[in-house]
Amino acid sequence: MAPEGFSPPAPAGEAAALPLNAGEVAQDSGSGEVDPALRLAGGVLLLNAVLVLAERALLSGPVGNGPGGAGAGLVSAVIDAGLGISLLTGNDRYRSLASLRAALGLLVFTGLHAFRGDMMSAAVQLFFSGSLLMLLVGTPSGLRRTLALLGVSLCLLLEGAGLYSLRTGRDLFGGVFSGAQEVKGGVITGRKFPFRMNVPEASWRMRSEESAAEDNPLVDRWLIHPKTGANLLLIGEEIPAGSQVNLDAFGKAVVNNLRKGMSVYETQPPVCDNFGGIPTCLIRGSGNANMMAVEYEIRVFSTPGAAYQFIAFGPTESFLPLQDELRQAAQSFTID
């Protein structure tokens, strides 16, 4: 039985209306045979559901509580899994529903990513949903199936690379798709606060203001080290004019906030010093976040009218060799 909303090829002498199949000759596998594109679409939906569930598992902490939350991702994955299994068995009963799911993904999620300024995610969503529709609508020819498979394969490859990055902290593409830029002159200046600091080393990159604010709106500057997965956040906080913060209490507050996203967190006793007349304390720690062992190096600075957090972290095995350059960067911290 033909799926709802689909007109079977017309008899000879009549033009068959096949959506999204302009200029192609439809391939009819014959009565009783399942359209291969249907099974391909089912496999894609099922694999996508598995990847979404894996991503939600890695982002089970506060990091993953973004718009929609983990519950929304779980519901989406369950729907995709159900549709995928149905299509894989050759049942075209829910083909129209799968097409609607792909169309909504194309319009809604592509638009949301674009509205946020995340054009990379918008492009991936566009290709993924568009390729799904190429498999689901009409009777795809061999050429259309091939093009659709190329599109979804690229998207799933990028999604897999993203999971690898979440699990290991390393960026397989060296930060090419992160939008982070090289810091010209090797010196960071504050956006909201009047600080200045040397970049730890030339391979560090600075995230755009929009990208950093999406993950943490309090961050003034956010640097990443694509090769190791290390991050460096600089956060300023205003205090009453002329006063200075209690560094011991301030450091404990910062550590307590970090513990909220950690399953295990251990800290070393703080080491306090004075860099260029600016009182500072260093707190080193280690823990587990998103099923990954991480190291933290936290410095808190106290200046008249503002307190600053210098929070560096990354995967344990790759973070420790960076401590010398991070210390040199912290020593260059100054107020303009």
Image (cartoon, rainbow, N blue to C red):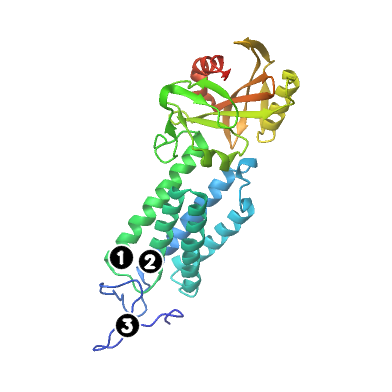
Of the residues shown, which amino acid type is indicated by label 2?
A: Leu
Q: Is residue 26 left or right of residue 80?
A: left
Of the residues shown, which amino acid type is indicated by label 3?
A: Pro
In the rendering, at what x and y percent does residue 27 appear?
28, 74
Secondary structure under badge 1? helix
Residue at 34% across / 73% down in the picture? 139
View extreme (left): residue: 13
Relative depth, front residue between 231 and 75: 231
Label number found at residue 279: none
Label number found at residue 144: 1
Label number found at residue 9: 3
Q: Is residue 53 left or right of residue 267?
A: left
Nearest to N terminus: mark 3 or mark 1: 3
Residue 126, quarter of the rendered image = bottom left
Relative depth, front residue between 262 and 212: 212
Tags 3 and 1 in contact by the CB under 8 Å rule? no
In the rendering, at what x and y percent does residue 322 appear?
49, 19
Secondary structure under badge 2? helix
Query: How many C-alpha atoms fall within 10 Å of the one at disc 1: few (<14), some, or many (≥20)?
Result: some
Image quadrant in which the N terminus is located? bottom left
Of the residues shown, which amino acid type is indicated by label 1?
A: Arg
